[in-house]
Amino acid sequence: MPFAAADSRLALFQPVNAAGSVFLSGEGGTTFSTGTNGFPLYFLGGPTRLGAYGTNELFGDQYYLIRAGYLHDLVALPPFLGKRVYAIATLETAKTFDFLLPTQSGFPMDASFGVLAETGLGPFFVGGSVGDSGHRKWFFQLGRVF
C-alpha cells in the first residue's frame, strides 16, 4: 500500500559568536497527488508558521516553508523563573499548492521579531510579524516555538 501523505522538517543551528546563532530550517509535505477527500491536509499561518498571516489562512495538499533567522542570548533569568532570555529575528517564505485561496499572495513571506524566554512553564515568546500583502500581527505564545 503506498503512502497517502508525507512531511518532513529539518533545522540547522550554527553559533556565530558567544551570544548568537544563525539558523536555517525547512519543512514540506505532500499527499502525492492522491487527494485528501476534498479536505486540505496542510495549513500555514499563525505564530509558528508565517506569523504575519492569520491562523491557518493558507492551506493545501502540498506545501513548503523555509525559515532563516538569528537568535541572540540576552540575559539569564533567576532560577525560580527559568533559564535564559533571547532576542530572535526570522525571515520566512512558504507556498501551498492546490486548494489555494483566490486572495492568497503568490509567494507568501514575512519577517518576525521578538523576545523568547525559557521559563519553568515552557518557552514564552512575545513579538510581531510583518508580511507581504499588508499582513501584520502582534502575538505571544507559550509552548513550542520552532
Image (cartoon, grey):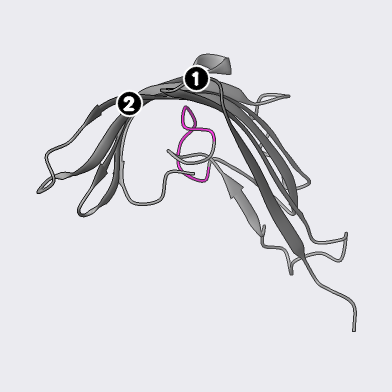
Question: Does the rendering let one see residue 136?
Answer: no
Residue at the bottom extreme? 1
Question: Does the rendering let one see residue 26?
Answer: yes
Q: Is residue 27 left or right of residue 118?
A: right
The residue located at (52%, 39%) in the rendering is 45
Q: What residue sits right under mark 2 in the picture? A: 127
Q: Which residues are magenta?
A: 50-56
Report the amino acid beneath label 2. Gly
Location of residue 67 in the rendering, given as x and y in whole percent from the top left corner: 62, 31
Q: Is 99 rendered above or below residue 6?
A: above
Between 137 and 15, the residue placed more toward the observer is 15
Crowding near the residue tagged with mark 1, few <14, some 14–19, many ≥20 C-alpha atoms within 10 Å? few
Q: What residue sits right under mark 1 in the picture? A: 17
Location of residue 135 in the rendering, given as x and y in whole percent from the top left corner: 48, 21
Q: CA distance from mark 2 to mark 1?
A: 24 Å
Location of residue 80 in the rendering, given as x and y in whole percent from the top left corner: 9, 49
Crowding near the residue tagged with mark 2, few <14, some 14–19, many ≥20 C-alpha atoms within 10 Å? some
